[in-house]
């Protein structure tokens, strides 16, 4: 189980298809805190700050690959390729955390 799962006693049910991307991104930031440099964490926080209003209300279950691709394309059009890259890093990190939590939940059964 990851540190974040242990700290918050998270279960598969706590981070499921109805969890919002905003909540998952917040958990990812917590998980990264202490794991990355202060500067990297600051970049992640800045990214989540502007990314959350765009996708934060969408649930994990609604966040399909096509929807991610569309959101990243829109970010690249509206901002530039650098913010799109930062958004991709945050989304990859958040979804990897979800997979880790799901695997931890399955191993406890």
Image (tube, helix red, strand yellow):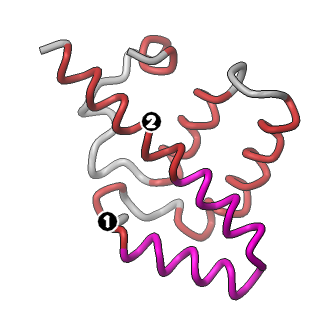
Question: Residue at image x 80%, y 38%?
Answer: 40
Looking at the rendered structure, the number of numbered marks drawn on it comes to 2
- Our reading of the magenta stretch's main secondary structure is helix
Q: Residues within 10 Å of mark 1 (few under 14, many from 20)?
A: some
Outermost residue to the bottom: 77
The residue pinned by badge 2 equals 97
Q: Is residue 52 left or right of residue 67?
A: right
Question: Residue at image x 29%, y 51%?
Answer: 18
The residue pinned by badge 1 equals 62
Q: Is residue 105 left or right of residue 19?
A: left
Spatial CA span between label 2 and label 1: 17 Å
Q: Nearer the viewer, residue 100 or 50?
A: 100
Identify the image quadrant of the C terminus.
top left
x, y percentage for residue 54? 59, 70
Residue 76 is inside the magenta segment: yes
x, y percentage for residue 89? 61, 52
Element carrying mark 1: helix
Q: Is residue 12 left or right of residue 20?
A: left
Give the magenta-colored segment's residue range: 66-91
x, y percentage for residue 47? 73, 55
């Amino acid at each position: 189980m990851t540190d974040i799962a242990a700290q918050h006693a998270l279960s598969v049910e706590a981070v499921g298809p109805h969890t919002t991307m905003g909540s998952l991104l917040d958990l990812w930031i917590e998980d990264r805190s202490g794991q990355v440099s202060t500067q990297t964490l600051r970049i992640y926080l800045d990214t989540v700050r502007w990314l959350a209003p765009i996708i934060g209300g969408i649930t994990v279950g609604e966040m399909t690959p096509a929807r991610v691709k569309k959101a990243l394309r829109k970010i690249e059009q509206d901002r530039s390729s650098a913010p799109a890259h930062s958004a991709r890093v945050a989304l990859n990190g958040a979804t990897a955390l979800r997979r880790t939590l799901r695997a931890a939940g399955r191993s406890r059964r």
